[in-house]
Image: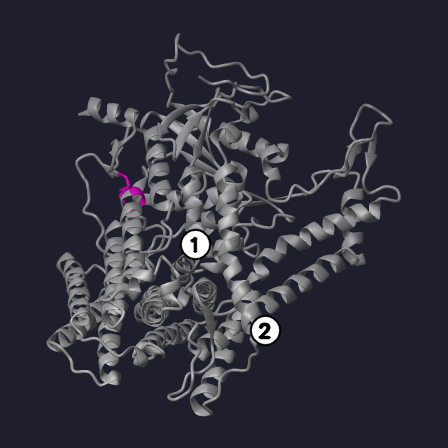
Amino acid sequence: MPVPRYGSAPVDRPSGLIPPPVDLGGVTELRLHGVGGTTAEDLLGDLAPQQVSGDRIAGFYRTTDLPARPASPPDPEHDQPSRHIEAYSWGGLTSRSGSRVLWLLLLPFALANLAGWMCSPRTHRNGFLFRLHRTAVRWTALGITVNVVLITALASMELIGYQCGARDDCAGQIWLLSWLRGPILAAHPAQRVAIGAILPLLVVVGLAILTLRTINRYEEIKPPFLAGQEPEREAASAAQPRRGLADRAFWDGRRSAFDQGVAHVAAAAGWIALVLAHTAHTIGHEAGLGFTEEYWYTAALALGGVAVLGSLLVTAVDGVHRVLTGALLVVAAAALVTAAVFAVRQPGADAATQWSYLPGMRNSINMGFIGLFGSLGLVLISSLLGGWRKGTFFIYGPFVVLSVSIALLNAVLLGAMLRVIDVFAEVSSRLLLPGLAVDTDTLYVYPIVATLHQYLTLPPLALIAAFVVYELVSYWRAGLNSPRRKETLAFYLDEKRYPKPAGEDGWYDSAVAGAGATRWTAGVVRARKVAGMARHIDRLLTSMALTGLILLVAIQIRYWYYHELPWGTQWTVTLGTYLAAALPVLVVLLLRRGWTNLASRRRIGVLWDVSTFWPRAYHPLAPPSYAERAVPELQRRLWRLHTSGGRVVVAAHSQGTVIAAAALLQADNLPADGLFSLATFGSPLRTLYGWAFPAYFGDGVLRGLQSRVRTWRNFAYETDFIGGVALDPLIPAGVDVVLPDPGTCWYIYGQPQPLARRHTGYWDDPAMWGEVDRLAAALANLSAPAPADVPVQGGPPDDETQVTVTELK
């Protein structure tokens, strides 16, 4: 039951709560919001808009029709025709549910998936280079998943199961762990280690369940297809050479996400089995014990190795047969069972031999990280071969983003591990050597872990602080730049461009007149300076990645060649662990606030609206791609309006412009004779996506978008810190319209001076919406489209679509 705002008349509707009929013909203005989950009520200026398609998570809503208004002076070409006003509210896919903000905890996985899409255009065009890039990124992403398992295993299998479980003053003093000192487990370290392996296994199972649920919710949606012509589900992912957004199956990622997810689960489970079997075997070897049924050990190593190698194969080759992915899970499960049986059946050991590190764990960790950094090195090689183009991410985006992902993951997990273990007993990084006395109330971590951790936290934080100071100084100096201020002052003093408003003499004042002109123009110049700062983040990330690479090489030379630990003191180690452990606590506090405040949830969700746009073709355990559902839904709505004789002006803001572009670029998923126009504002198509993902949002791709619609206008402010021009300014195409911001220097005396609109001011800018009116008028004057076949879409259609299909049948 709509309740329009701003004095517009309510819609006619039947009595009771029966929704009014929906006219699909004529001109429809379809609005798409940007980041943050803007509601349909805010998009339409209507307290209770009518939902006409979709569901509460993502749906289409209507308000009252915009009445026809003749131009003044009369001009039929500029008359504003009546048109329907709709909004596609997709924010429920990312930020409206309190539980969805928990995806923030998977930021390293999201960054790993994002890195795969950052390849250069040269890499994307070359089949060999792209397959090298795809394999290297996927193997690194697989290594990141194993990285999580290794750190979890270090905490649960070594520190809790092996060390703490061997001591009465540790496990015996904590009721939660006291059962480890029972008569069965106290003298059987291999069995305690097997119990400790349950925690990393639960982490793997949890990620698998989460991935499967999100695949069914997001990737299950099929691209539009004609009735009776349903295509097969795409077996390969969208990560293919020369395959871009225009490919009809780009967003059909269900099969590949499932296959890649199985590979990650199988690799993680297989690695747990290898670690468990190897440590149980090494315990008996170093204690001088005999082995019981050692063929279980051989079977565990063989099955675990097959699971890991098979996962590497699945991640390297797209579109593998389902039999192989199913066999991987069976082999990984068999590896876990055989490793557990081997560990459980080992004889007991003298408690005096258990006061040390878990035998074999160090080798397991080293092998895992050798594989991880080897894959990362392969990413660097592929990035070097792919080249670099001016105007894109500062240098070697995939390598930089993956490096940041790995550093962030290890800094947080290791810091949290050390602080959590410290609750059970004192944690020491003192090197344990044979024959040295140990403290009975202390748990020992490898010295390299503690000393290396400080380099994962303190140098990045120092670089971030230096970056913030640099940007603040740049912001301050921008306002002192006399040439820029004089240029801005001259611009607004131009009486032809900004004449004094007529009427109310004496009430209007100018912001560029009098003593306040210097301050006002400095504010405008600084707003323009801030607009360019968002793309300076590549300098920070690149400096962090290169600094980390240099430190890693130096530390490895010092440790392996000179046999010395990295430099560090106790206070730097402690500070680093507290800072890293505080990060997830801060995230939890933000999440808690998000659960109780919708506006806060929107702000938290901004990060995911940008980073989860892409399909999960590189890391399947990353947060799901909302575009897998949003793009096909938008295409279905456009096609349905077309088949009813309608034509559409898509008015998209910010991230909504990316969804609109992705939908309109796919010619096979829209009617060939569709009458669509496009108005984008605050658009990151070039400034962000063309900068970070040049292979998929390059200038050539966006010029192809221009040919897919009747008219495209892109509006931008120089003060917009996210959006900007869409096409290369050196090759004019009549698409970009740069609007002045502030829009005027005049204001009514006693009221605030005009402020910069920045990124969100387009919605109430009359200059922009006047152009949208002209786009609608131009569409209304076109001849009606010819009848077309009716498309349907797999998955549960909305009620109205179901009625239409039934009638046609």
Percent from the top left, x then y, of residue 138?
32, 65
Residue highlighted by disc 1 = 105
Give the image quarter of residue 351. bottom left
Count of numbered circles on the image: 2
Q: Residue at x 59, y 73 (%)?
A: 571
Q: Amino acid at mark 2?
A: Trp
Bounds of the magenta segment: 217-224
Nearest the camera: 545 or 65? Answer: 545
Asked whether residue 408 appears in the rendered view, the answer is yes
Q: Quadrant of the N terminus?
A: top left
Q: Relative to residue 152, is residue 767 drawn left or right?
A: right
Nearest the camera: 116 or 711? Answer: 116
Above or below, 130 against 773 in this view is below
Above or below, 83 against 541 in this view is above
Nearest the camera: 58 or 651? Answer: 58
Circle 2 — which element? helix
Q: Amino acid at mark 1?
A: Leu
Above or below, 419 against 452 in this view is above
The numbered disc on residue 598 is: none
Tell me which secondary structure the magenta stretch mostly adopts.
Answer: loop
Residue highlighted by disc 2 = 571
